[in-house]
Amino acid sequence: MDENIDIIEDFDDVACRFDVNGECVGMRLDVYLGMQTGESRSHIKNLIENGNVTLNGASVKKAGQLLKLKDKIAIAVQEVKQLDLTPQNIPIDIVYQDEDLAVINKAQGMVVHPAAGSYDNTLVNALLYHLTSLSSINGVVRPGIVHRLDKDTSGLLVVAKNDFAHISLQQQIATKSAKRYYYALVDGAVLKDEGVIHTFIDRSAKDRKLMAVSRSGSGREAITLYKVMQRYVGYTLMEYELKTGRTHQIRVHSKHIGHCVVGDRAYGGSNRFELKGQLLHAHKLVLTHPRSGEVMTFEAELPNYFKDVLSKLKPANI
């Protein structure tokens, strides 16, 4: 037996289990779990090294363990750590919540989780105040955060209240069974009524804080579906559906097709309306409830500042 494996009893509290099929034989354990859960390789490695993963009932300490047919993998629910963050009574729009998850309609201008330069007044600070529990999978800085929205993007995001729900929800996003739809007002007239934008996205060589479509094929695959909702003189209201979730994906893809999101100064969008941020709103979220299996659809109408801009535009005669 591998010296990196110790036989133990199976976990009493399991977040998820996986059975290895033929397509994944010979794959590294950390690569396989990253593919199944959507988590980063570094996070998966930490789970393994901390003894939170078993392979066929044995605790695995080696992330590079190669998988065999019908191997059984379990990930334990992590013990919730005391969070070194301050709960803050910041008003947030909780669209729905139960014991497993909450759906939030995030306001434009709110940072999702603490980072350099934004250690408080974030959505996480508000969640710690308003919700009784949050998952621990993303550690003490990003508790409950399954996916993110940019600071100046408004709309729906789902929050996990325990590790069981977190892994299920993140797996749904990784496998594209969860669906995320956005409305965006973009500059110019988009000619095709619908289409697919398929590129690779990497850090911009000119500004490392921004992202860009990679011309060399480096970076990560990014797929966005789009549909024209309404045409205006000089502008187009678009609906985007994310098939992948790369940083700034819609904003980068909008720029890539020559129609930047209005108000997105970082990526070249116009700003004649003196907006505080881009007109990009996550208006619909479809997911499967981790416990009940029910398919749930949530929708959030456009914020007033977005509606106000649309009301000032003249419909195009096309």
Image (cartoon, helix red, strand yellow):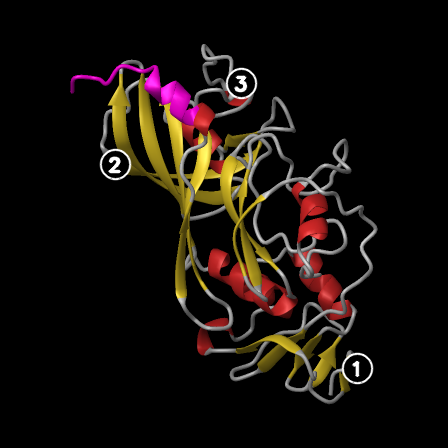
Q: Position of residue 78 (x, y in %)?
A: 73, 69
Q: Residue at x 34, y 15 (%)?
A: 312
Q: Residue at x 53, y 35 (%)?
A: 248
Q: Secondary structure at mark 1?
A: loop
Q: How many residues crowd mark 3 within 10 Å: few (<14), some (14–19), many (20+)?
A: some
Pointer 1 with pointer 2, Cβ within 8 A: no
- What label sits on residue 160 in the rendered view? none
Q: Position of residue 211 (x, y in %)?
A: 56, 31
The amino acid marked with disc number 1 is: Glu
Q: Position of residue 69 (x, y in %)?
A: 52, 82
Would you say residue 314 sits in the magenta stretch?
A: yes
Residues drawn in magenta: 306-318
- 81 w.r.t. 8: above or below: above
Direction from residue 120 to residue 64 in the image, left or right = left
Which residue is the site of mark 1? 3
Which residue is the site of mark 3? 265
Relative to the observer, which residue lies in front, 192 or 124?
124
Chain-order first, disc 2 or disc 3: 2
Relative to the observer, which residue lies in front, 141 or 208?
141
Q: Secondary structure at mark 3?
A: helix
Q: Nearer the viewer, mark 3 or mark 1?
A: 3
Q: CA distance from mark 1 to mark 2?
A: 55 Å
The amino acid marked with disc number 2 is: Glu
Which residue is the site of mark 2? 194
Q: CA distance from mark 2 to mark 3?
A: 25 Å
Direction from residue 299 to residue 236 in the image, left or right = left
Chain-order first, disc 1 or disc 2: 1
Q: Residue at x 37, y 26 (%)?
A: 257
